[in-house]
Amino acid sequence: MNILIIDDEKPQRDSLAGFLKKRGHATASAASGSAGIAHVEKHQVDVVLTDFRMPDQSGLDVLTAIKALNPTIEVVLMTAYGAVDIAVDAMKASAFDYLIKPIDLDELELVLGKIQERHYLISENMLLRDQLAERCKLPNLIYQSRAMGEVASTVARIAPTRATVLLCGESGTGKEVLAKAIHYASPRKDRPMVTVNCAALSSTLLESELFGHEKGSFTGAERQRIARFEQAHQGTLFLDEVGDIPLATQTKLLRMLQERTIERVGGSEPIEIDVRLIAATNRPLEQMIKDGAFREDFFFRLNVVSITIPPLRDRREDIPLLMDHFLNRFSEENIRGKMEFSKEAQDLLMKYNYPGNIRELENVVEQSVVLARGTMITTADLPSAVRQLPAEGKPEWPTFSGSFVNQVAAFEQDLIQKALDKTNGVQRRAAVLLGMTERHLRYKLQKYGMKN
């Protein structure tokens, strides 16, 4: 394993490095937390051993920064202070373990053995997930993050109902996959799921697709068209990009949701339908309502249950699972045999920001599989955007005046306040966004004297 040692005491760094090298590990050292974080940004690291008490920042601050860069890196805190609260805070902040100084080398070796075992179990779990998905032949929600865990929990609760669902999120976050998961987990799973991309059709075509038309109802209507609502009878209709629906069509959809009937274009007979409606959008519907571009009453009908899918950059724990899923799929499709990413390539893929979310990750993996010269995908096979890690692919570090400790404190307070603002002050949801426990968030609020 590649192990980074962060400690302001050189004898401690040298002692640990010598021991680890004899055990076959590659090591690197840093004399401060900031230097350690900078090393992680530029190099592939599997495990970080960091001192808790350092002049520039604490081990918990280092832990938070490293997990933000790459959640798969395991962090072990070392401290000469055996206080229970330090250990509890460390574990709550996602540290793998903690060690008391002077370091017991046998205990260190045991901890590293557990980390290797954990990595093996994670790999095995990903294989089992793929095998289960193949057996079930159902859309698979691939995740291990808490944020997506909450989404999956909501899906499990609403799937058996007939409630209308509004899926929100950036492009490429997997809204259609989630819609399929809701459908196939519902009592309607044996009936059709029909998808309509509202942004891809003109207003006239969209209305004809949704409601159908009678023969001769307009120029070019040479035959009767069955409505998508009729095709989805007793099943599910998925309206993608619902924010692009014209106001006139919104009015007809509102009537359908109220009366559960439709009329074909050019027809006069109401047709009863039994359809569960799932809509998706990446547009701010509330702002569109203020601008007069979206009907408020239609929004309320759609927004019975609302699920917001977090962007991939906010749930980096899911990247390794998705990488493996796409790698296996594209390797098989392109008859490339068993392929894998080098550790350096994996590290770059973990640090990239994915403005296109899961869809972009999927494209990156497919391109890498196609261009790879052998069965090992290296950094040279990755797209240039990933290799270069442009500014948008790295965390933004605002500039503050004052000491480094004060800068870190100001940065933490700014992040916490933004998370609270985004979640309307709900601490549990803010903690999920920040990647920490609610208890740890309350500790930070008390520490900085922040009111909520």
Image: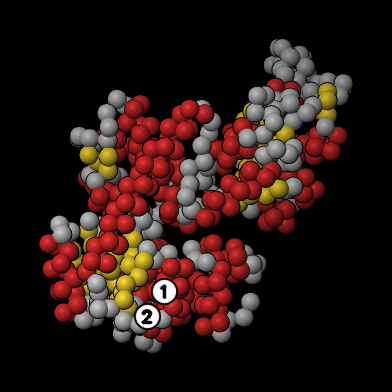
Q: Which mark is residue 447?
A: none
Residue 359 in percent (x, y) is at: 45, 41
Residue at image location 60% in from the left, 65% down from the top:
428
Frontmost residue, 430 versus 93? 93
Q: Is residue 299 left or right of residue 195?
A: right
Question: Residue tagged by mark 2?
Answer: 82
Q: Amino acid at mark 2?
A: Gly
How far across and down, in percent of the image, does residue 193 sit?
A: 64, 28
Task: Name the residue type under label 1.
Answer: Ala
Q: Compared to 251, does 193 lie above or below?
A: above
Total numbered badges shown on the rendered structure: 2
Structural crowding at the residue carrying mark 1, measured as other residues with C-alpha within 10 Å and reported as few (<14), some (14–19) or many (≥20): many
Please name the residue shown 36% across and 56% down the image.
72
Q: Is residue 394 visible?
A: no
> Which of the two residues, 131 or 248, is positioned nearer the viewer here?
131
Nearer the observer, 284 or 265: 284
Q: Is 196 displayed left or right of 146 in the figure?
A: right
Q: Residue at x 52, y 55 (%)?
A: 146
User: In what quadrant of the picture does the C terminus appear?
Assistant: bottom right
Tag 1 near tag 2, CB within 8 Å: yes
> Quarter of the image holding residue 1?
bottom left
Residue labelled with disc 1:
87
